Image (cartoon, rainbow, N blue to C red):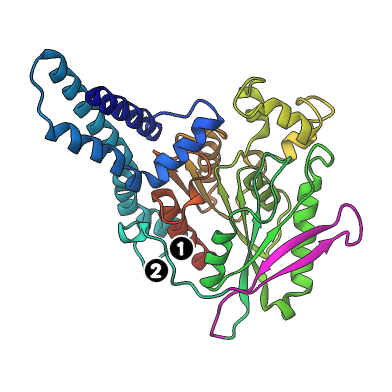
């Protein structure tokens, strides 16, 4: 009986670990894929224990021997797949500094792109002062706020500001998303403005771009009291927020916006409609209808086009950092790949970091393989474009 239990445990581990190599088919398995990809280096302990137990107990007879061999095979496969993200991250880390140097110039960072030690929780950061600021339509039902994280600096100089635009499919999410990431940035000397924006379907594009404009205007107007450099902003968006960030940065040029960062985001809404399905994991066609007012036709074509950074990019567009998981279940990896190709064609400095094991929201764990590479690339990018 115990041999069957070990076999079932090994099979479960292998099925879970397979999510680092194959795209998750639904939302429930997407969450498991996120765990496998960014915490697999710890979770590999489970198949390792199964392997030890199966190895220590010999088997006499054909059936027990087959059960033992199957358990060992599945356990080895599970352990290998769970360690695969760390191995692939190490390989990518060797190339990443050169990629960043070619695009943005050399920088000196006091850390490696990826390390085993970096997988452990970092408790060294000091306190960060955070305040809530109303930046648009105060006193109305459409009032919008941002959480402002004051930069931790000792040089007395005004700080560059990273404006964070949250994800959530344009109809959900808020500024509190991944607050630990914002604190990490503030501890490294960057002010952070994590903003809310109006949500679909009540408010459709380009209302969200207007909200970014309002946030920037307010931050510039209050730059002195906030300790900001009003000429050094970077937009950073996740998923739906990444679409807003790149479409705004390219479609509404502002010399104060020195760069734009998009994590696992769609950048061509016509392309998204073309390949979306009513029954896909996000019901993406319905999301697009809610956000843009309908399918792409004569009534909505302007919204689709003005929301698509792939169509808006020009040689004068700001420097861009794109990071996307190749196994993303929610936003097709091709979206970032196509924008990267377009930016290369027109000469915009950019880097596309493609994570072969990763799914959507890989930056949830800053110490995971995806989190470490993302934060390293981001530190390099911010140092280069805000110097």
**Against 4, is 91 above or below?**
below
Whether residue 387 is visible here, answered yes or no, is no
Please name the residue that numbered disc 2 is placed on.
Answer: 109
Left or right: residue 301 versus residue 100 is: right
Please state the horizontal and vertical placement of residue 230, each as a whole percent of the image: 70, 72
Q: Badge 1 local density, few (<14 within 10 Å), some, or many (20+)?
A: many
> Of 80 and 5, which appears nearest the observer?
5
Left or right: residue 9 versus residue 330 is: left
Report which quarter residue 130 is drawn in: bottom right
Residue 141: within the magenta? yes
Element type where label 1 sits in the image: helix
Labels in figure, total: 2
Element type where label 2 sits in the image: loop
Please state the horizontal and vertical placement of residue 101, each as a whole percent of the image: 40, 60
> Of 325 and 361, which appears nearest the observer?
361
Q: CA distance from mark 1 to mark 2?
A: 7 Å
> Of 203 and 295, which appears nearest the observer?
203
**Against 332, is 210 above or below?**
below
- Stretch in magenta: 128-155
Going 39% across and 50% down the picture, which residue do you hit?
Answer: 369
Image marks 1 and 2: residues in contact by CB distance under 8 Å: yes
Report which quarter residue 332 is drawn in: top right
**Against 75, is 248 above or below?**
below
Q: Residue furthest right?
A: 140
Please name the residue that numbered disc 1 is placed on.
Answer: 380
Residue 201: within the magenta? no
Please state the horizontal and vertical placement of residue 321, each as a whole percent of the image: 52, 52
Please state the horizontal and vertical placement of residue 183, each as a whole percent of the image: 56, 66
């Amino acid at each position: 009986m115990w041999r069957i239990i070990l076999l079932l445990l090994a099979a479960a581990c292998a099925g879970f670990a397979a999510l680092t190599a194959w795209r998750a088919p639904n939302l429930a398995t997407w969450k498991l894929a996120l765990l496998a990809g960014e915490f697999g280096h710890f979770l590999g302990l489970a198949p390792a224990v199964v392997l030890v137990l199966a190895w220590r107990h010999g088997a006499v007879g054909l059936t027990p021997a087959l059960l033992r061999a199957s358990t060992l095979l599945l356990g080895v496969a599970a352990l290998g797949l769970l360690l695969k993200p760390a191995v692939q991250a190490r390989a990518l880390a060797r190339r990443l500094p050169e990629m960043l140097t070619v695009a943005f110039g050399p920088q000196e960072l006091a850390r490696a792109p990826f390390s085993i030690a970096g997988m452990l929780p970092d408790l060294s950061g000091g306190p960060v002062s955070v305040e809530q600021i109303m930046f648009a339509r105060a006193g109305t039902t459409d009032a919008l706020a941002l959480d402002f994280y004051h930069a931790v600096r000792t040089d007395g100089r005004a700080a560059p500001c990273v404006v964070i635009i949250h994800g959530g499919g344009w109809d959900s999410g808020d500024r509190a998303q991944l607050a630990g990431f914002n604190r990490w940035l503030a501890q490294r000397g960057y002010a952070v403005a994590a903003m809310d924006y109006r949500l679909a379907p009540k408010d459709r594009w380009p209302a969200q771009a207007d909200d970014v404009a309002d946030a920037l205007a307010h931050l510039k107007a209050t730059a002195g009291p906030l300790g900001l450099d009003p000429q050094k902003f970077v937009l950073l968006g996740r998923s739906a927020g990444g679409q807003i960030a790149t479409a705004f940065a390219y479609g509404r040029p502002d010399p104060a916006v020195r760069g734009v960062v998009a994590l696992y985001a769609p950048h061509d809404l016509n392309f998204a409609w073309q390949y979306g399905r009513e029954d896909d994991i996000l019901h993406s066609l319905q999301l697009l209808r809610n956000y843009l007012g309908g399918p792409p036709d004569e009534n909505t074509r302007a919204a689709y086009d003005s929301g698509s950074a792939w169509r808006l990019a020009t040689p004068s567009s700001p420097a861009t950092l794109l990071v996307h998981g190749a196994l993303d279940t929610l936003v097709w990896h091709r979206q970032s790949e196509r924008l990267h190709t377009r930016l290369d064609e027109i000469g915009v400095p950019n880097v596309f970091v493609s994570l072969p094991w990763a799914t959507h929201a890989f930056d949830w764990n800053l110490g995971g393989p995806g989190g470490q590479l993302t934060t390293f690339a981001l530190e390099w990018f911010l140092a280069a474009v805000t110097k």
